[in-house]
Amino acid sequence: MAGEVLPYKKFHFMTSRDFLKSLRDTLVFVYDGPHVIIHGIADDKTEHIKKMITKQRKPKTYNSLEGQLEPKRSPRIKKAPTLYVPAFIRNNLFKVIKTFPNGFSISILPEIYSKVNGAKLHINGHGFENHRDLLLAMPDIVRLEFGRTNRAGQNLYVYPAKYLTQTKVHGDKNNIAENKDCLEKEVTTEKKKEDKAIEEKSLNKETEKIVKNHLAAKKVNTGPKQEVNNIFKQEYSPACQILQRELLQLLSGRPNGTWSLNISSLYEQKYNKPLELKNYGYFSIIEFMSTLGNKVSMYRPLPSGDWFFNIRSPNQTNPPKPPATDLTDVKIKLKQLMSRFNDGIVIECLNDLYQMTFNSSLPVGGVYINVETLLCKALDVVKLCEKDGRCMVLPHDHSMGASPKQGSPIDAVGGGVCYRTLDVPAPSDDYIDIFVSHVVTPGAFMVQLIGEDTTVALDELMDDLEEFYCSNEAAAYRMPSDLISVGQVCVTVSIQDKNWNRALITKEPLDCGFVEILFVDYGDIASVNVRSLFLLKEKFLNLPAQMIRSRLSHVQPYNLGSWSLDSRRVMLDLCRNKPLVAKVTGVDTHNVMSLLICDTTHDTIDVYINDVLADQQFATLVCDFASSHELE
């Protein structure tokens, strides 16, 4: 009515509701469910107006359908999705809290985060509207309190969580999954203690200046190599460290190791609480276990199988292999079973028939993640074939008629044709732009050259492949069985990203119907079903294969041993999904480039990948020479 916003900030209130609640001699609050109704208190001059209003008759409603047509069901109330803070942000914020244990204003959080961690704090992509909501989702690391208003008009300050400074938390007492709403009530309650808090806190209007001076002094006293090490040094919150100790205790009690599928149930049995990894910022047990790389060995027997975990011994170099199941008895029983079904058994029914016949199930699980994987180890007894659109298990000596040959399109690429290769850049003092597309070890990885004729042209090719091989016309390009041989160019779908990719057959097909291929534009190897292979259309052969084999210059494995799994993981973390620059220091006789790689995406420093691996003791700096055996 006045045409102005209620000036509650002028009277030092956080919200208009707090301001109205302070006018208890003028207003009365009545709660009607979720609604709050405000009534004015009448005085001698307005008492007669209140009586006149209360005596007014309310107009009747004449809705004849009111109360008769009730909704069949109540509307479904959608719960707001729970937001989780990724582990790398939690760890970086914990590093900030350790750097400033006396607290700081929330208004300078982005600047502090960038200075300490060498990267900006981005919250929009994780569902948080502001920094306050982000911090409220981490009650195990930070707490928010009201203090004296600073120059920016902010009076909310960030401090370490109370138990980080007052108590020593034990694993059994720790409960990270606190309710965000409860924490918000605690922050609101602190408003009532504002006067007392102002006297107790040492922060004042010069907080920002003190923090900036602290950062500036720290930057002067720290050399560039120490700053790089500080950025990439992993620091975990106490709650995360407690979970790490619990999982290490769990694995210590199982000297033979265990599979990742069993971790959650074993954890709940031992500690009587669920394993809530999302509360720590991790979204899989594999991701969390990678934080224990120096204490836990991780092994994956099959490319698409489960992971096996075991405590790493002090002198262990290679991860121990999980115990294998003896298939001698299984093969004998399979041979007996198949003798009763000469026409074959549908693979979905094999386990049921096996159990009905021998009163025991097939040893599926662990190394053999499914029946197909198990049968691939018993191809001397059985074989897999497709019949009437179904996968059939047949006796090993069963013979089937050869499939008829079909004519191929004229523009399909047949045998004896190969992809062109890119011209490898010569050694130079200039830097080139690259993407690291696949990493085997720091001594063997694949890169792509960034440019209009390379990565941009590849993106356009990928779109064309998607459009053509998803159409009805692609059915005529299905690869005949007589063309499936080593060196044949083809097209298939990558299991990793579900995109159509150009490929090359690198091994002869197995009896189980799978064949090994190389994705020539990225460098990774996969095993795919022969039925998923398609002939390459001739126009898609023009672009050269985009992968270039490379290695890091001037580094060898630490102590001149073999590259560890952790070294590969660290290099992946440093190079994944970002453009890099590289200096070519050499090219060997196999056209393998030796590279000095630098990450220039940080605001304050340039990170040299070769140096980081050496500083973290994953590599040893040596005179450069290419080892041909590590790339074969």
Image (cartoon, rainbow, N blue to C red):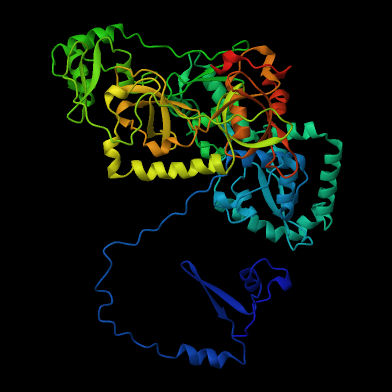
Measured as percent of width and height from the top left, residue 35 is found at: 49, 70
The residue lying furthest to the front in this view is: 410
Quarter occupied by residue 355? top left
Snapshot quadrant of residue 281: top right
Indicate whether 331 appears above or below 564: above
Question: Looking at the picture, does residue 169 appear above or below residue 14?
Answer: above
Q: Position of residue 362 (x, y in %)?
A: 28, 17
Camera-nearest residue between 256 and 167: 256
* In the foreground, 518 or 362: 518
The number of callouts visible is 0
Q: Position of residue 50 (x, y in %)?
A: 53, 89
Residue at position x 27%, y 27% from top? 480
Residue 17 found in image quarter: bottom right
In depth, the one of 71 and 333 nearer the eye is 333
Q: Position of residue 196 (x, y in %)?
A: 77, 57
Viewer can see residue 304: no
